Amino acid sequence: MSGSSRVRAVLVFGLLGAAGCAGKQQAAGRGEDCYRDDDCQVGLVCVADRDGNRVCSSDVSSLTSMVEGPPSDAGTPPDDAGTQ
């Protein structure tokens, strides 16, 4: 195989491989494998199931927030509020 034929073959196979990975895939339904939330149909999120596999689900009870919420007494005014 000559040098230009080899280069041409590499380019053709490279383009074919890239075309196989390009483009958005059809969104996964409930219980189907996913990698991120964008892989799932609207209304579903990508969560880990009991076996540790990532699947699309509408049940978000397994998700844990890493954001610290307000303190437990944030909604109650102090006892001396409004007195002077």
Image (cartoon, rainbow, N blue to C red):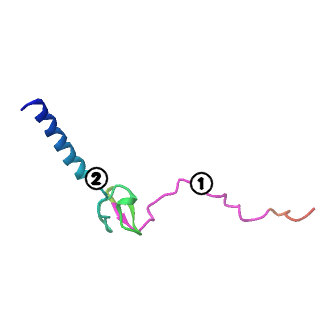
Q: Residue at x 71, y 61 (%)?
A: 74
What whole-number distance in Å separates the C-alpha atoms at marks 2 and 1?
A: 39 Å
Q: Main secondary structure of the magenta part?
A: loop
- Chain part drawn in magenta: 55-77
Helix, strand, or loop for circle 2?
Answer: loop
Identify the mark at residue 68; answer none if there is no mark. 1
Q: Nearer the viewer, residue 61 or 42?
A: 42
In the picture, the quarter occupied by the N terminus is top left
Q: Is residue 61 magenta?
A: yes
- Dot label at residue 22: 2
Q: Earlier in the sequence, mark 2 or mark 1?
A: 2
Q: Is residue 62 left or right of residue 23?
A: right
Question: Of all residues shown, which one is farthest toward the front?
Answer: 4
Image x and y of residue 79, in percent: 82, 64
Q: Is 37 located above or below residue 29 in the figure?
A: above
Q: In the visual, does 2 lie left or right of 28?
A: left
Q: Amino acid at mark 2?
A: Ala
Across and down, in percent, residue 26 comes to 29, 64
Crowding around mark 1 (Cα neighbors within 10 Å: few <14, some 14 to 19, many 20+) is few
Is 38 in front, or is 83? 38
Drawn side of residue 1 relative to residue 80, left or right: left
Q: Quadrant of residue 33 in the image? A: bottom left
| Residue occupying image coordinates x 8% and y 30% | 2
